Amino acid sequence: MTQRSLLEVEDLRVRFHLRTGLVEAVRGVSFKVGKERLGIVGESGSGKSQTARALLGLTPPPGEVLANRLTFDGIDLLAASRRTLRALRGGRMAMVMQDPKYSLNPVMTLGAQMVETYLAHTRAGIREAKEKALAMLEAVRLRDPERVFSLYPHEASGGMGQRAMIAMMLITDPDFLIADEPTSALDVTVQQEVLRILDALVDERGMGLIFISHDLRLVSSFCDRVLVMYGGKVMEELATGNLSDAQHPYTRGLMNCLPAISGSAHPLPTLERDPEWAR
Amino acid sequence: MIDIKDLSIVFGSGRLRVEAVKGLDFHVEEGEAFGLVGESGSGKSTVLRAICGLAPIARGSISINGNKVTEPRGRQFYSTVQMVFQDPYGSLHPRQTIDRILSEPLSIHGQRDQDLRIVAALEEVGLGPAYRFRYPHQLSGGQRQRVAIARALILNPKIVLLDEPTSALDASVQAEILNLLERLRTERGLTYILVSHDLAVVTHLCRRLLVMRNGEMAELTDSSTLRRGQPASAYTRELIRATQGFARAKALSAVPRRICGKAADPLNSAEHMHSGGKNTRPRSP
Ligand SMILES: Nc1ncnc2c1ncn2[C@@H]1O[C@H](COP(=O)(O)OP(=O)(O)OP(=O)(O)O)[C@@H](O)[C@H]1O
Ligand SMILES: Nc1ncnc2c1ncn2[C@@H]1O[C@H](COP(=O)(O)OP(=O)(O)OP(=O)(O)O)[C@@H](O)[C@H]1O
Ligand SMILES: [Mg+2]
Ligand SMILES: [Mg+2]
């Protein structure tokens, strides 16, 4: 990417001082993202979500965020006031959370939450907001958008909640979207549709996208570049579709562990993790 | 071991009324791994929740070991049947440490050696003792999912209902969990129903599987039929084709990326792609 980066991250660290000891969730991560699709994959617990949350100032207390540089479109996110951050979040920057049904407001219907978000960031009227919300719900292939609009989060199925959250985050036309496991509850047909929508937003509107997933095959086919995380660090960066170029033994070992419809070994091969990887 | 007869489940009323499950029948043998698949919203989670007494049964019956389940379910039921919920966040008590979450079922059922069993249960799902005294919100998504699995298995139940148990796990940890589930079945005769949108995961563990669509059975099939790519219903063929389509889309992405129209509005382009997607989706031979 030769164009200017929207987001710049240099030596990001996230730590939690717990009574039981220090947890170093992110240990010195650096990357830049422009108007492109950056994928982040990695082992469960490797720091993907905490990296994403730090970018939006959503690190849960008592977490501590350190970085040499953390900027969005020239704005220093570490020095920005809470007000600036709040205005950015949900407006120019949005995040689809990993546990959508639990990051939504449990006592408000999905539709009301979408309308509220839209009104907070545009000068539209209620009617327009509602139309826009229904159109977004339809775009993520929800069968009965009217019904989903009226449901409370706990009344939606796993995949319905996930799609409603995506619709909610896209309703304000963000310049930058961080999507944390946005399609993990969707089957392949619906997943494809959702990816096409994100794809179009990047290609046509110039949105920047960080796409976090544990699914290496999915990410490497969808993203322009992929960061592979392990133990709070970036192990390597891969170019699109070049899984066979992976150097790190974690990345190389991953594909062997996947079952296949055509049949696979019983038991499945597993990874021998070398403590050196987490150095 | 599990008998479901003519099960119907209805939520809401009026405009919001939905018959989430419509007259479903199936039977799971003792020691069997039974798969439940189908599109999002087709009623998979609702069936599992109904077995545990967590969904309103409008009609039909559920029997375990030949006995109709009682309302409410009672302690005996939960020492036989455990469930791993699709949303681990919602099913783990937010103010309890992992230690407490795992020790509580042991205490309720008067079991001993709690310390040893907690450490062993965490170890089995790849979590070291360092996680034992954390709270659920202090874990990653996949770590929470593994705690939910550990909690379901710690009482050595006869039956486990698994709702998307590995959806948040990377391939390496997923393989460890799938191997654990398979080992428990062959060594201890564990019976389970596995819900997953990943057909490869389901066919790896389950011989028979039920495909749901819109609250009904689309077909009852088995893994070897799927392996040969010959399921009876059009819907199941569509599911398999989509899996293959994804692999093909991967090959396509090396070719120019601009598969979508020029529309500036994401909604228009999304619609544009819906119809485009259907027509251009490659047909399986
Ligand atoms: N609030 C917290 N307090 C202490 N430790 C935490 C907290 N949140 C996360 N962690 C730890 O930080 C590490 C990174 O967590 P993170 O959620 O970023 O992982 P992840 O890569 O998103 O994993 P997954 O794929 O399982 O969601 C994990 O080991 C986790 O246990
Ligand atoms: N408490 C509830 N109130 C109202 N409707 C509900 C409730 N629980 C489930 N439903 C509805 O029942 C239908 C089936 O939901 P269910 O969660 O069983 O789907 P699923 O097959 O598990 O889908 P997914 O793969 O997306 O998790 C959905 O339309 C859902 O909105
Ligand atoms: Mg995560
Ligand atoms: Mg479900």
Image (cartoon, grey):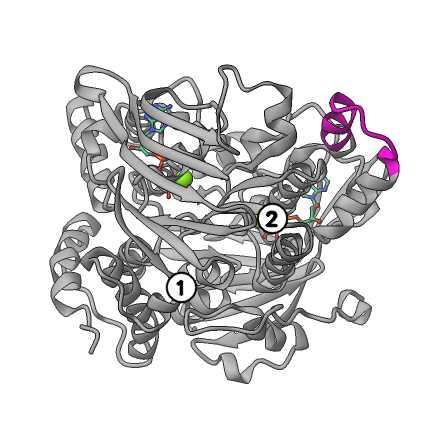
Rendered residue at 30%/36% (across/down): B24
Which quadrant of the figure has residue B21?
Answer: top left
Q: Looking at the picture, how far across and down is residue A134, in whole percent?
A: 20, 34
Determine whether A39 is above or below B103 in the image.
Answer: below
In front: mark 2 or mark 1?
1
Residue at the front extreme? B66
Neighbor class of circle 1 (other Cα within 10 Å; few <14, some 14-19, many 20+) is many
Q: Amino acid at mark 1?
A: Ser
Q: Is residue B110 magenta?
A: yes
Rendered residue at 21%/51% (across/down): B266
Q: Kindly indicate whether the residues beneath marks 2 and 1 are on one polypeptide chain.
A: yes
Rendered residue at 87%/36% (across/down): B115
Residue A126 or A227: which is nearer the viewer?
A227
Q: Looking at the picture, how far across and down is residue A110, in whole percent?
A: 33, 27
Residue A22 or A189: which is nearer the viewer?
A189
Instruction: Read off the chain for label 1.
Output: B
Determine whether A155 is above or below A168 in the image.
Answer: above
Which quadrant of the figure has residue B77?
Answer: top right
Circle 1: element type: helix
Instruction: Give the residues drawn in magenta, as a range.
Output: B101-115
Q: Looking at the picture, how far across and down is residue A249, in whole percent?
A: 67, 77
Asked whether, in this view, residue A109 is left or right of residue A63, the answer is: left
Q: Amino acid at mark 2?
A: Gly
Residue holding disc 1 = B223
Residue holding disc 2 = B142
Circle 2: element type: helix
Report whether the residue tagged 2 is closer than 8 Å to ligand 1. Answer: yes
Neighbor class of circle 2 (other Cα within 10 Å; few <14, some 14-19, many 20+) is many
Instruction: Read off the chain for label 2.
Output: B
Q: Which mark is residue A266?
A: none
